Image (cartoon, helix red, strand yellow):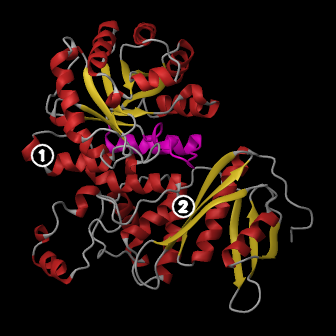
Amino acid sequence: MAPADPNRVYIFDTTLRDGEQAPGFALNVEEKVEIAHQLARLGVDVIEAGFPISSPGDFAACQRIAREVGTLDGAPVITALARAVPKDIDAVWEAIRDAPRNQIHIVLSVSDIHIEKKGLGTRQQVLEKGVAAIEYARQFCDHVEYSPEDAGRADRAYLYETVEAMIEAGATVINVPDTTGYTLPHEFGGMIGDLMRHVRNVGNAIVSVHCHNDLGLAVANSLAAIDNGARRVECTINGIGERAGNASLEELVMILRTREKLLGLHTGVNTRLLAPTSQLVQARTGMHVQANKAIVGANAFAHASGIHQDGVLKDKLTYEIMTPEEVGVADTRIVLSPRSGRHAFRHRLQELGYELADDAFARAWEAFLVLADKKKEVTDRDLQALVADEARTVPERFTLELVQVACGTSGRPSATVRLHDGERPDRVLEDAAVGDGPVDAVCNAIARLVDMPTVLVDFTVRAVTGGLDAMGEASVRVRHEGRIFSGHGADTDIIVASAKAYCSALNKVAAERPAVSVPAGSGV
């Protein structure tokens, strides 16, 4: 089953499966569904929703994505991962069956080191197990993908034998993974080229690749594979994933777009939504990309050198090979003010790729008015941080009403915090605490008010834009009963941003534990 358009590269997004396997990540069901909707708007061809057998939560997320995203007009194919065993395949089918365009994805090792060290038996036994899994899956689904894990380190002859057998058994997609990121571009590209020549029935399946970034070569290896005949690429937003991550979706897509005349290839991705999608994933996972990250980093379209600035002012083509607008990064000289009105505000958000429900828009508008009074300029990056803070996906039980801190070179920092408890609107909670610093004192005060035993795992704060009146963006991750919950907050005051982020994380904990108690005597 060769691709209908031989010049199109199909984008398989695994942000919600392999991406979420990155250490420290913990997306809840609502966040996964939200990201899946954004991926559908972005125009990816396939969404890998998760690994349903791994947990009830992951099963529920996959099922909701299949039902809510997979049923939309023009929706991507919805798939999920299974090991080569019936119970995994059953779980995938039950999770994704409601999506009209669905696919079962099966993975089984192919390298000798995996087969031997994992105790999988002989090569022949692994081959037979894979064939049986494909045949079993085809009872449910017309589209089945098979991934021979660790193909980058496998014996070539055995890899070709495996691919031929799986296509013969009914696999419609063969995905060749460089699971450990071991190969060099000429090696991986050569392997794909040889596979295309030596597997007699390869024309009956789409050849896909899945490259990891352990040596920083995931994008280069994927591009080499495309150059040798692969027409589907598995990748993630911001390149997140196991260990050093996966091939970066935004980098691959923009390479194909920017060098389309040379390569003669294209994708169906709406590149103007790349930056908003990147921002959403950063906000929900709590993992921010470095400033010099290609395509979506804060400095991707910034020019500091005087020579560069002079050239860009004369003609942007002197130092920019793509325009910011192509990837959804608008000109930061465009400034919104409260006088722009609601219509202009909504229009600008839509241009940035955000479609907010009425309640989320109302919160964002109110936050924008407050921000505009504090800043001389409200830039697009301010708006992206603001929307990430206001477009909440869980009920907001605890609302921050007041933060007051005292700190300096003498005495211990102290903080007074007032919260509103949405479940007890007749009570306002207020308390004070001390800490090692103002942020620690604020968090201690909030913890005293909200009786949920949590451990702060990670805390980061950064300036979203330049200048003394820059928006501060804070992200926290807390551990509660063995699970990780992330929170995000933005404000011109980094102490307030930190308090918002901590409350955001606690609201996610509260959503999982509806019967959270409040300490006696802490209400006023």
Q: Which quarter of the rendered picture does the C terminus lie within?
A: bottom right
* Pointer 1 residue: 260
Q: Quick one: 456 or 268, which is closer to the camera?
A: 456
Does residue 230 appear in the picture of this structure? no
Give the number of the disc on residue 327: none
**What is the x, y in percent for residue 116?**
47, 21
Q: Residue furthest right?
A: 520
Q: Residue at x 16, y 28 (%)?
A: 5
Does residue 276 appear in the picture of this structure? yes
Q: Amino acid at mark 2?
A: Glu
Q: Which residues are magenta?
A: 15-44
Element marked by disc 2? helix
Instruction: Give the total of numbered labels.
Output: 2
* Pointer 2 residue: 390
Q: Are marks 2 and 1 in contact (CB under 8 Å)?
A: no
Is 142 part of what is drawn in magenta? no
